[in-house]
Amino acid sequence: MIRLAIIGSTGSIGKQCLEVVDKLGKDKIEIVAMTCGYNLELFKKQIQKYRPEYTASMSDREDISENTNHFTGEGGIKKAIQISDPDYIMMSVSGSIGLKYSLFSLDYCKRLCLANKETIVCGGGYFLNKAKMKKVKILPVDSEHSSIFQTLLGDVKPEEIFLTASGGSLRDKNPEEIQNATVNEVLKHPVWSMGKRITVDSSTMVNKGLEIIEASYLFDFPQEKIKTYICRNSFIHGGVKFIDGSMKFHIGKPDMKLPIAYSLTYPERVVKEEGINNLDELNLNLEKIDIKKYPSLKIAREICGIHSLQIAYNAADEEAVKMFLNNKIKFGQISVIISKTLDRIPELNNLNYNDIFKIENTARILANEVNL
Amino acid sequence: MIRLAIIGSTGSIGKQCLEVVDKLGKDKIEIVAMTCGYNLELFKKQIQKYRPEYTASMSDREDISENTNHFTGEGGIKKAIQISDPDYIMMSVSGSIGLKYSLFSLDYCKRLCLANKETIVCGGGYFLNKAKMKKVKILPVDSEHSSIFQTLLGDVKPEEIFLTASGGSLRDKNPEEIQNATVNEVLKHPVWSMGKRITVDSSTMVNKGLEIIEASYLFDFPQEKIKTYICRNSFIHGGVKFIDGSMKFHIGKPDMKLPIAYSLTYPERVVKEEGINNLDELNLNLEKIDIKKYPSLKIAREICGIHSLQIAYNAADEEAVKMFLNNKIKFGQISVIISKTLDRIPELNNLNYNDIFKIENTARILANEVNL
């Protein structure tokens, strides 16, 4: 029986995690804590169904449920993590607050299922060293990283890793159309249904940039050996190439529930899914990424391994995406804001906890001050 | 330092094994014994280059080399296996004599690298139980089985296995053209350059049928869950699907040296090959196999798991291929000979050593007696 805490149960990953929990069944997994930000309406329904002993939310409303010990605020979420004594924690909040919770979680669980990019991108070596020291197993929940994790099982260190990208909603537009793409155009993702920021990040490929950085840390691998391709239907998730030229590809339906379930059941596979039956009907082709269309992807490769710039890259993008969604900047200006913010951040490594969050704040401020 | 005996060094796999040995280098591998059938001209050159202490051939000529202890005949080959004290044995002879040597080898090595189909197809459970008892590790050298072996590393038992076939030289012909295909047409294999029998067996898909049987024994897997597809360029070698819908594909250039090297270096990968660099230039599509074009493939599935019929299937095919290559029968009659031979063989399992070779001889005689 796994005792699971879900941090961020009302988000896209959190909701899908609950579907996986349903499939696993009550004899295999128990939700001991559940937390959310501000979506209390959904949260209350979730609590009613799953009845965790401990809950928490960022909202300061305390009348959540009669059947749970409820805490509020960042401290309340940490308290729920601590007091519920989980085996595994599903870290499915978005944003850099996730890094704080992930770091805190290392003291209170055996396995951290990681759907929060900032934990690795902003936590960098600081986070991973701590996880190693505390002997907490990190299971990636991103479909790309889960696929690489799976293809590496039982084998030697690879020579190359590759990740795929859908190419986002603008993949077939020309550079000028991309420059001026509207919010509505950008939010129509061709494959995945996700939150707004990550949908925009798919179109700029900031998302893929963050994933390259994550993969580089998670698999201790140089970014230049992490290749990226477009896979239009997202059936090929990722793979590896070994020194002898052998390659292993991880292939399946694009469904986040698979990597979520895997992160919970590894090394077993438990959740039954039909998957793809007729391999002859699959289109398995990969395409080169036209780097000119995705300047932010190029930037990510340049800063990969420079901890301070990784933090700034993520923060500046988050700010720029907000501006774009509020119609304050053009789509094509997102990468300009990232680039100009990075120009003003010193290149620093070996950061500690305070440094990380200071640099993040500074980057957010600088991003908002960029002269376009 | 691996002490290697190569049984069948002058055949297609044997020659490529020597290339792999060259790449591995003298500090990693030493050839302690080498045997061949009758190709003494090439064998002498190989001996001169690799200088094994013990050699043997089926030919009774004894003036092979001054620098080696040479033995002759089947007994001589066994003697070379025994006396050379190898760690690993590469079993690269073709035909059912390979089963005899494989069984004998189980007493004299830690690892058997198996390129001889008959060892599994005709040896069946008798062979594999013995290997298990003697704790000899069986490493498949066939590219398909090596690929499945590799995709299974570190993971759970799969729900499905799949093998690919090039489709052979007649893959784009219509049934009537196939029926009457000439020897020259059949021997033009689109991808692999191999011996004559296996090239014919590719076009009839008897080869794929034998591989289904082999996979079923090697991976303890029911034949109906072993799927087959055509992969025109043979870049996809095989793969597995798990209960959660995840699939792993093994992909690479069609080059027998890869599975040969892997069988020698597992669990490491040592022999450097550039492999495929631009995944976007790969055509990774799979095609359904039109079973009507390949009646022998259907027969293989029907008899998989019935030991006596597996032996007869292989023996009848070998006889039929000889007849076809000598222009005594039409291409389309190969499957008829197999089918009519099988009709006259009783369905037996739990065979012992003598049974196996008796059934084989009977099947050969019956195959030659088939009224077309």
Image (tube, coloured by chain):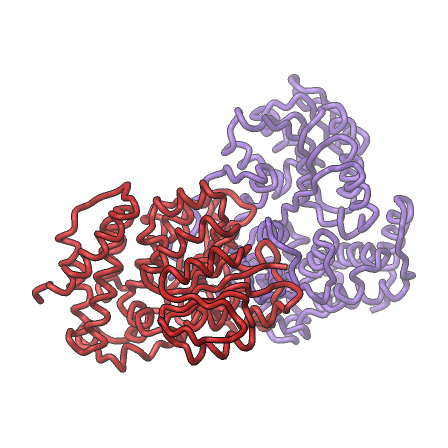
Chain colours: A red, B purple
Q: Position of residue A138 (x, y in %)?
A: 47, 51
- Quarter of the figure with residue B72: top right
Front residue of this view, candidates B171 and B212: B212
Q: Does residue B62 appear anywhere in the picture? A: yes
The quadrant of the rendering that contains the C terminus of chain A is bottom left
Residue found at the far bottom of this picture: A184
Residue lying at 63% horizontally and 55% vertically, measured from the top left: B156
Quadrant in which residue A64 is drawn: bottom left
Q: Quadrant of the N terminus of chain A?
A: bottom right
Can you tell which quarter of the image residue A368 is in? bottom left
Q: Is residue B188 visible?
A: no
Q: How many marks?
A: 0
- Compared with B100, A144 (above or below) is below
- Name the side, left or right, on which A98 lies relative to B268: left
- Where residue B195 appears, as percent x and y from the top left, is 63, 49
- The image shows residue A292 at horizontal and vertical percentages of 21, 63
Front-lying residue, A205 or A26: A26
- In the image, is residue A58 above or below residue B249? below
Left or right placement of residue A255 versus residue B196 in this view: left
Q: Is residue B61 left or right of residue A277?
A: right
Name above or below for residue A347 compared with residue A75.
above
A7 left or right of B313 in image = left
Residue in the picture at 69% in, 32% down: B35
Q: Picture coordinates of residue A269 (x, y %)?
A: 61, 60
- Residue for point 25% across, 46% down: A306
